Amino acid sequence: MKNRVWYADILRIIAILLVVLLHTSSRDFERYAIGSFNWQILNLFDGFARICVPLFVMLSGMFMLNPERERPIRVLYQKNIFRMVKVFLFWSSFYAIFITLFPFTDIHITQKTLKTIWDAFYEGHFHLWFIFRIVELYVMTPFLKKIAEDKKTMLYLIAYCFVIGFLIPTLRRFPVASTTTIVEDWFNLDITFGYVAYYFLGYYLNKFELTKKVTHILYGLGIAGFLITIVGTSVLSMQRGKQVDLLYEYLTPNVFFAAIAFFVFFKQHIQHYQPKGDKQKIIALLSNRSFGVYLVHLLVLYILWKWGLTTEFLPTILSVPLITAGVFIISYYLITWLSKIPGLKKIIM
């Protein structure tokens, strides 16, 4: 464990906790009146948790773009890309069957049932979109790594990606900029460039030390980003009388700066942290299981929802953290148990 970057492990654990928090809180908005106390608490949790996916992408870039970690293209495809393909095929099949047939009573397999399962498999369960994004970034890694060798070129590309992937798409959602180009209509360039920016930022922020001035500016932008996400969502939703998720999106400037500030804060404060003894084992285990927890946690949530467990059993300020903690713990032990089944570990995580 000597070569582990412990602050990255801790960030990865926090990121998966935020994913579970997001999916716990986001489902129940419709149960509460817009603007009510319980709705605002859900908005607070959900808005804060939106940095989860950016953190995961930044952590991937932090390691994958590191020139000290040589990885031939053949190894990249065998160890990373093909692994992700196998994971997608397994979990897309699993969720397609589970969602279609659960709770597995009075099952009748008809042509319509099979078509429903096939369509669900082909589309992939909604949280599996992350696999496509990561595979896309992995495929691009060999030449992105070349760009990462030059600091100025990397900074230029990050700035360019911010404009194309975050600023312009966000402005297009408002009346000030509603026109599109042929290129934008044909290709999702904004999505690609947006995640490329996060990918590079993970490597850049880990490798280079920021000045105090830049750090404080990023903290200010991060706090502003969190406030815009939470307060802005509240204001827009109450104005329109319905849930407005625009500012929750991962590729918005507010989430962008919130994620950067959070990443920088952790690096600045715990990059030299060295856990001892059992703490090492616990952090390493939780970090290593984080992707598995990501894949399986919605199964746990679906079962709890089918049993009628929602955030309404207590005020949301209590119920959301309790459900989040419970789902995380169950998911961790479930994926740990599944990974011990011979031959299964290589295709489930």
Image (spheres, rainbow, N blue to C red):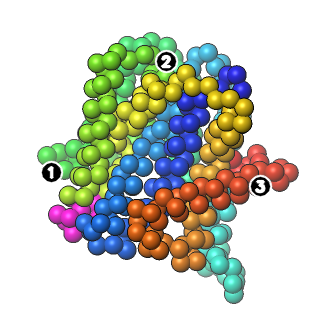
Residue 178 place in picture, x, y as percent: 19, 49
Relative vertical location of residue 159 with respect to residue 293 in this rendering, above or below: above
Q: Residues within 10 Å of mark 1 (few under 14, many from 20)?
A: few
Residue occupying image coordinates x 30% and y 25%: 216
Residue interval drawn in magenta: 236-244
Q: Which mark is residue 175?
A: 1
Q: Is residue 172 above or below residue 11?
A: below
Which quadrant holds residue 346?
top right
Q: Nearer the viewer, mark 1 or mark 2?
A: 2
What distance separates the C-alpha of mark 1 from that of mark 2? 39 Å
Q: Which mark is residue 221?
A: none
Do the residues bearing badges 1 and 2 touch, measured as CB atoms within 8 Å?
no
Type of amino acid under label 3: Trp
SS at mark 2 in the image? helix
What percent of the width, then of the height, locates residue 257?
Answer: 33, 35
In this rendering, the answer to whether 313 lies above or below 201 is: below
Of the image marks 1 and 2, the number of the one nearer the N terminus: 1
Residue lying farthest front?
277
Which SS class for mark 1? Answer: loop
Residue under the image location 15 percent in, 51 percent down: 175
Residue 183 visible at all: no
| Magenta run includes residue 190 | no
Q: Which residue is mark 3?
A: 337
Q: Nearer the N terminus, badge 2 or badge 3?
A: 2
At x 58%, y 16%, the residue is: 67
Amino acid at the residue labelled 1? Pro
